[in-house]
Image: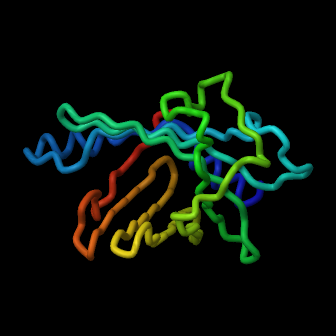
């Protein structure tokens, strides 16, 4: 099995941070939101993929809950291998005609046309370096002159560590330097 397929097997599935939340509540200090990721390959939902297409498009459904605050953040990512045999995450725009509520892995009516998909102009692709089955990547993107987004991920045997931080003029406005720790539930 090639590196990309091994990585995708680690990445896809349902992940929650229930264990992290449990530990934070026991310590009396819940820092992170209750979070869930559902990652699934969606190549079959994309028409006009080139013959012998070598990447995996993945829908990442992200659900966050803290107090009365609930948020849904779906993403469309393409995972490929670069010339150094490293996994590369490229972010794509969700097509305008699809609501974020409908952009789900379990939506059997969801289809996208490859020829109409657009790479996100804001997100700087992330390269994962692999070391003994552990994949780590970091991407720093400049959404505006004053807004910076830093994404750090580590993926290893059923766990994902995800740190997402937005900074405006150098000050953190949203996110967590200490990662949300997800465990695979299926």
Going 39% across and 46% down the picture, which residue do you hit?
182
Going 57% across and 64% down the picture, which residue do you hit?
121
Horizontal and vertical percent for residue 66? Answer: 22, 38
Is residue 49 placed above or below 133 in the rendered structure? above
Going 61% across and 61% down the picture, which residue do you hit?
89
Horizontal and vertical percent for residue 24? Answer: 17, 46
Relative horizontal placement of residue 89, taking residue 154 as reference (left or right): right
Pick the front one: 74 or 56: 74
Relative horizontal placement of residue 4, taking residue 15 as reference (left or right): right
Horizontal and vertical percent for residue 158? Answer: 49, 47
Is residue 34 placed above or below 83 in the rendered structure? above
Pick the front one: 14 or 126: 126
Going 61% across and 38% down the picture, which residue do you hit?
40
Horizontal and vertical percent for residue 165? Answer: 33, 63
Relative horizontal placement of residue 113, taking residue 69 as reference (left or right): right
Is residue 152 placed above or below 99 in the rendered structure? below
């Amino acid at each position: 099995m090639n590196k990309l397929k091994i990585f995708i097997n680690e990445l896809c599935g349902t992940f929650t941070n229930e264990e992290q939340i449990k530990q934070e509540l026991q310590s009396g200090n819940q820092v992170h939101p209750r979070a869930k990721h559902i990652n699934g390959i969606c190549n079959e939902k994309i028409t006009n993929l080139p013959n012998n297409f070598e990447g995996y498009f993945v829908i990442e459904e992200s659900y966050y809950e803290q107090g009365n605050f609930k948020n849904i953040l779906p993403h469309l990512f393409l995972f490929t291998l670069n010339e150094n045999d490293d996994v590369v995450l490229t972010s794509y725009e969700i097509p305008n005609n699809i609501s974020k509520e409908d952009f789900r892995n379990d939506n059997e009516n969801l289809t996208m046309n490859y020829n109409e998909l657009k790479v996100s102009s804001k997100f700087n692709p992330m390269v994962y370096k692999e070391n003994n089955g552990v994949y780590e990547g970091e991407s720093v993107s400049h959404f505006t002159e004053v807004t910076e987004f830093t994404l750090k991920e580590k993926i290893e045997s059923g766990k994902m560590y995800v740190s997402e931080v937005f900074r405006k003029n150098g000050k953190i406005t949203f996110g967590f330097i200490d990662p949300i720790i997800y465990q695979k539930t299926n």
